[in-house]
Amino acid sequence: VLTSGRRVPAKTRNALALLDGRLVGIQQAGEIEFLEPLTPELLADLTRALRVSTLVRRRHATGDYASVPMRPYAHSRSGR
């Protein structure tokens, strides 16, 4: 994803939160940072989504979900 501003390496544990096409949050190295003011409800929802998506990706990467196919966009480029 190309946006102006901060760069986030494309690693399995990093994630982006988009809202109406805008980058509003980043999870990098286990830390979540929001880039603009959001309502408390939206902050909670996005935080939960970022944390859950990281756990799911990690389980897929370790084979914990070996019988559950991954969505095509969730595959890493290295094929792991």
Image (spheres, grey):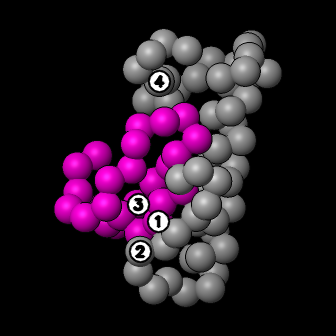
Q: Which mark is residue 76?
A: 4
Q: CA distance from mark 3 to mark 2?
A: 11 Å
Mark 4: amino acid: Ser
Mark 1: amino acid: Gly
Q: Is residue 64 left or right of residue 22?
A: right
Looking at the rendering, the stretch of residues picked out in magenta corresponds to 1-27
Task: Residue 67: give x, y in percent of width and height.
Answer: 74, 13
Q: Is residue 54 above or below residue 57?
A: below
Mark 2: amino acid: Leu
Q: CA distance from mark 3 to mark 4?
A: 19 Å
Along the viewing direction, whichever of 71 and 24 lies nearer the viewer: 24
Classify residue 54 by image quadrant. top right
For label 1, the SS is strand
Give the foreground label among 1 and 3: 1
Q: CA distance from mark 1 to mark 2?
A: 6 Å
Discs 3, 4 touching: Cβ within 8 Å: no
Discs 1, 4 touching: Cβ within 8 Å: no
The residue wearing badge 1 is 25
Q: CA distance from mark 2 to mark 4?
A: 25 Å
Q: Which mark is residue 35?
A: 2
The residue wearing badge 3 is 18
